[in-house]
Amino acid sequence: MTRLAIIGDYDPRKIAHVVLPQALERARDAAGVNLGWEWIGTDRVLDPSGTLSGFAGVWLAPGSPYVSMAGALAAVRHARERGIPFLGTCGGFQHALIEFARNVAGIAGADHAETASGATDLVVVPLSCSLVDRTGAISFVRGSRLHGIFQGRPTHEGYHCNYGVSAAYRTRLEAAGLSFTGFDPAGDIRAAEWPDHPFFIGTLFQPERSAPQGKSHPLIEAFVRAAQGCVP
């Protein structure tokens, strides 16, 4: 069985947490993968080499601020350094940016405005316009992994967030190898990926919100297929 670790502090009041397993079920059935998953609280991931041993994929779920930011970042680093398929959505994407900024781009003080507004290097900052319970169109850079996953077509996705990438750090993150590959019609960043990794994708939008529509989401299905091919 292919096992996924869903990193997040489960709260049944959060829509994303309720529908995420439903989205995995739909992707599992569409991909024909023998798939299982386990919710793991962020405060349990301080030693990911033990806690995440045996998992073929890591999904850092929405729901920040996390109980343990250190645990969330440790999960990202574990997947990134070991080549384990990683998906981060909403807050998961934001924290993947911070981990990459700190440990790959050399921005040691990289932080999140939601939890450290006074930090010197705020890589994640408030959006100019809230995306809480909003939907919008997204297009992908030609040749990117996301462009391929969506077969070259734009998509329309749901959000529930107030924070995104600081434009001031885009160049430094790109210089370190991160590719910003998903954009809304105004040109604002909505997704990123790391080409040097088998599957490392983060999206500000929440693909799991597609579950009530009764369809398998292409990004989640691609993540499940990538995990199936991973030997943890």
Image: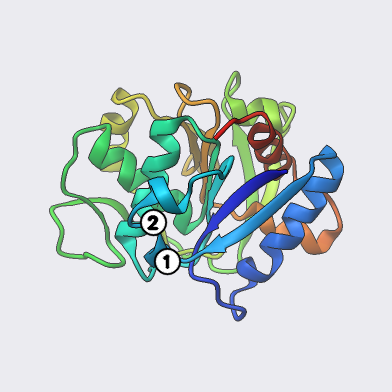
Is residue 158 in view from this perspective? no
What residue lies at 65% left-to-right and 39% top-to-bottom? 223
Coordinates of residue 62 in the picture (x, y in percent)? 52, 62
* Residue placed under numbered mark 1 in the picture: 64
Q: Secondary structure at mark 2?
A: helix
Mark nearest the camera among 1 and 2 is 2
For this rendering, which residue is in front, 66 or 56? 56
- Asked if residue 112 is positioned above or below residue 16 in the image, the reply reads above
Q: Which mark is residue 72?
A: 2
Relative placement, left or right, of 140 versus 149 is left
Coordinates of residue 7 in the picture (x, y in percent)? 50, 58
Using the rendered view, name the quadrant where residue 154 is placed. top right
- Where the C terminus falls, by quadrant? top right
For this rendering, which residue is in front, 44 or 163? 44
Is residue 30 in view from this perspective? yes
What residue lies at 57% left-to-right and 63% top-to-bottom? 39
| Badge 2 density bin: few <14, some 14–19, many ≥20, Cα 10 Å | many
- Asked if residue 155 is positioned above or below residue 159 in the image, the reply reads above
For this rendering, which residue is in front, 76 or 92? 76
- Where the N terminus falls, by quadrant? top right
| Badge 1 density bin: few <14, some 14–19, many ≥20, Cα 10 Å | some
Colouring used for the render? rainbow
What residue lies at 48% left-to-right and 37% top-to-bottom? 192
Coordinates of residue 129 in the picture (x, y in percent)? 45, 62
- Mark 1: amino acid: Ser
Relative placement, left or right, of 207 versus 172 is right
Q: Are marks 1 and 2 in contact (CB under 8 Å)?
A: yes
- Mark 2: amino acid: Ala
